């Protein structure tokens, strides 16, 4: 079935050539952002994410940066610092008694229950300011309150600091927050697992060490057996930084499993048995099957083979 463009009745939007030139290379969300801006003039990341149903505000920011680089958009100067309201000014401007937003009462009640304590007037004002002035949804605010309370912090100030970290991570909606919290739960489990292998308490890990462990599990797809294998190679240097160097080398070589590492012959000590017997020299027949021997005899033979290879 063939199609043709329907007749327009004055509701069309002109599309600049710069957008048409990038349609084939830009992804769908990026093109949608451009068309929405052309139709409405709205170029604020949070508003774009909400209007277009994007996965996160960060996706809207990436699209805006893309079109700025393409020449469709230009950056505006930020407002002078003196024009920006402080947190205290935002909170002071909230008149709780005059608000008729149905979500405010529910938000205040649920936040106090989640934080586990009654909030004073100034804290309630700051909580409501996060909702009305900063644009956080009630669902996100309550999730942040729950996370702050889980960490033993039961104040609106702690809730606000948690939200700052979330915004830096691209969290804006309830779905973003749930994905972020799920990722944090996985990270805590991985850090605890790795710390135990180093005989450390998770709380004793430095910020760099936590970042390194996150990288092992999330970017390099390493797991606890790979970390244990790296510790065997580290011998006396059982530090996170030293093991990071070993795992980095394996990742660069494409070694992502213990079997792959052992297949490269990079073994010592208790792992030597995993390498198997050496192949016979060219032109020499394979030895006949020998009677079953003790573990120590097998180990002695393997160690002798390694010594011969080293000295040769």
Image: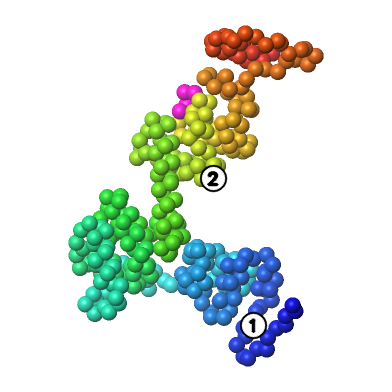
Residue shown at 44%/51% (left/top)? 183
Q: Nearer the viewer, residue 158 or 116?
A: 116
- Quarter the N terminus occupies: bottom right
**Numbered disc 1: secondary structure:** loop
Residue projecting furthest to the right: 283
Residue at position x 27%, y 69% from top? 106
**Which is nearer the N-term, disc 1 or disc 2?**
1
Q: Position of residue 97 (x, y in %)?
A: 21, 77
Residue 12: name its quadrant.
bottom right
Residue 31 is left or right of residue 122, and the answer is: right
What numbered label is drawn on residue 219?
2
Residue 290 within the segment the image draws in magenta: no
Q: Which residues are magenta?
A: 234-238
Q: Residues within 10 Å of mark 1 (few under 14, many from 20)?
A: few
Q: Main secondary structure of the magenta part?
A: loop
Residue matched to label 1: 14
The residue located at (42%, 64%) in the rendering is 173
Question: Looking at the image, is 165 positioned above or below residue 272?
Answer: below
Q: Residue at x 41, y 50 (%)?
A: 184
- The reply to whether residue 282 is visible in this rendering is yes
From the top left corner, tell me how far across and down residue 241 is, in percent.
Answer: 48, 35
Q: The C terminus is located in which quarter?
A: top right
Q: Quadrant of residue 299?
A: top right
Left or right for 141, reference 172: left
């Amino acid at each position: 079935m063939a199609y043709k463009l329907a007749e327009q009745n004055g509701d069309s939007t002109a599309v600049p050539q710069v957008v048409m030139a990038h349609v084939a290379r830009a992804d769908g969300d990026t093109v949608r952002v451009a068309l929405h801006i052309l139709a409405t003039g709205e170029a604020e990341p949070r508003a774009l994410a909400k209007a277009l149903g994007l996965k996160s505000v960060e996706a809207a920011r990436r699209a805006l940066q893309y079109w700025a680089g393409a020449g469709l958009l230009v950056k505006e100067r930020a407002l002078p610092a003196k024009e920006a309201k402080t947190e205290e000014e935002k909170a002071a401007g909230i008149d709780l008694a005059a608000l008729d937003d149905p979500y405010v009462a529910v938000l205040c009640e649920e936040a106090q229950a989640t934080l586990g304590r009654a909030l004073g007037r100034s804290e309630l004002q700051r909580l409501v300011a996060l909702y009305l002035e900063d644009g956080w949804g009630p669902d996100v605010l309550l999730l942040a309150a729950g996370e702050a309370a889980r960490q033993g912090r039961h104040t609106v100030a702690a809730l606000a600091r948690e939200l700052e970290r979330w915004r830096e991570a691209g969290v804006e909606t309830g779905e973003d927050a749930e994905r972020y919290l799920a990722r944090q739960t996985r990270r805590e489990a991985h850090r605890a697992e790795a710390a135990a292998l180093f005989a450390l308490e998770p709380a004793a890990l430095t910020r760099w060490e936590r970042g390194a462990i996150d990288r092992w599990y999330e970017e390099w797809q390493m797991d606890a057996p790979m970390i244990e294998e790296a510790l065997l190679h580290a011998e006396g240097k059982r530090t996170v930084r030293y093991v990071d160097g070993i795992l980095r080398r394996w990742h660069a070589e494409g070694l992502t499993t213990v079997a792959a590492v052992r297949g490269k012959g990079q073994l010592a000590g208790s792992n030597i048995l995993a390498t198997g017997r050496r192949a016979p020299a060219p032109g020499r027949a394979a030895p006949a099957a020998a009677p079953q021997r003790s573990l120590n005899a097998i180990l002695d033979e393997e160690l002798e083979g390694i010594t011969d290879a080293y000295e040769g």
